[in-house]
Amino acid sequence: MESGLYVVATPIGNLADLSRRALEVLEAATLVAAEDTRHSLRLLQHFNLRAPLQAYHEHSGARAQQRILEVLAEGGVVALVSDAGTPLISDPGYRLVRAVQDAGYRVVPIPGACAAIAALSVAGLPTDRFLFAGFLPARPAARASQLQSLRGESATLVFYEAPHRISETLDALCREFGEAREALLARELTKTFETVRRDTLGALREWVAVDANQQRGEIVLVVAGAAAVERALDEELARWLLRLAEDLPAKRAAAVVADMTGLRKKVLYDYLVQHRPD
Ligand code: SAM
C-alpha cells in the first residue's frame, strides 16, 4: 500500500459497517494513530488485526505528531482513527492532517460511518443544504447566544448532543426557535436501541421529558432550517414586533407590523405566541 496518512472512518455502533477498504488499510498499517488506544484495540482485536497503536488525541503534543511524520518519512502507512465514525468530525485530527500535508506526504480519506450523515439520511428534512453545528456550548448563556445566531439560518441544522443534556437542549431550542419547528431526534444509530423520531421541537421535548430512555445513549438532533417567513422577520423586525406586543394585544401588534411590512398577520401573530416572554 502506498505510504501516507489514511483517515479511516470506523463504525458508530454496528461493526459490520467497517468498510472493506478500511479493513485493508488497518491490515497494512505500520501504525494506527487512535484517539483512545484501549477503545481502538477492541476494534482491531475484533477483526484480528495487530497493527501497533499510538495515542493521538486533542492533547497530544508535538512528539506524537513527530513520531507519525517519522513513520511517513520511512515510507510507512499511518491510519488515523477516532473512537467512532469519521475522524475530524467533532473529533481530533485536523492539526495532524495539516502537518502531514504541509510536510508533503499523502493524506487519503477512507470514508464510512458518520453519525451526522446517517441522521440526515433518515431525517425526512431537506438535505440540499445543511449546517453541521457539532456540540452546542454547555453553558446556558453561550448556548442561547449560539442558537440565536442560528435562528434565521435556512439550511437544515445538525447538532451532536450528550444524553445528559438533551432535555436542556430541547428546552433551549424551543425557546429560541419556537416549539413548532420540525426536528429529528436520532438515538443509538446502527445499535440495538436505534430510535429515530421526527416531530415538532415541542413534541420532542415532551417525549424526552416523560421517557427517561430517550435520555440515554448517543444522540444527533437534526433541526429544520428557518422558513422563508422567519428569515424575512429579521432580528430587528422581530424586536420591533416583540416591543409593540408589550404595549398592544398580540393580534393588534401583529396587524400593525403586517401593515408596515406586507408580511402575513397570522405568521406574525404565531411568531408572537411562540416568542413572547410569558
Ligand atoms: N466522529 C464521529 C462521527 O463521525 O459521527 C462523531 C464523534 S463525536 C465525539 C460523538 C457524538 O456523535 C455523540 O455524542 C453523538 O452525538 C454522535 N454519535 C456518535 N455515534 C452515534 C450513534 N450511533 N447514534 C447517534 N449519535 C451518535
Image (tube, grey):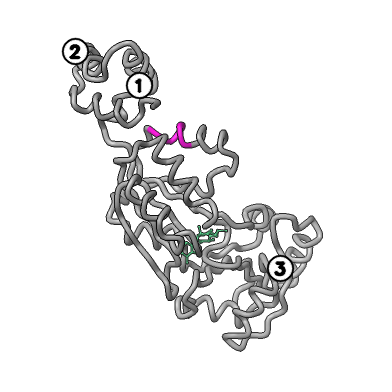
Question: Image quadrant of residue 121?
Answer: bottom left
* Rendered view: 35 above or below 266: below
For the residues carrying marks 3 and 2, which lies nearer the camera in this image? 2
Q: Amino acid at mark 3?
A: Leu
Location of the C terminus by quadrant is top left
- The mark found on residue 275 in the picture is none
- The mark found on residue 259 in the picture is 2
Give the Cα separation between the discs numbered 1 and 3: 55 Å
Q: Is residue 235 magenta?
A: no
Image coordinates for residue 131, horizontal then vertical, percent: 42, 45
Question: Image quadrant of residue 225?
Answer: top left
Q: Dot 3: within a 10 Å radius of its alpha carbon, few (fewer than 14), some, or many (20 or more) residues?
A: many
Magenta extent: 147-151
Callout 2–callout 1 Cβ contact below 8 Å: no
Image-based side of 254 in relation to 129, left or right: left
Residue identifier under label 1: 238
User: Residue at the spot x=40%, y=46% of the render?
Assistant: 157
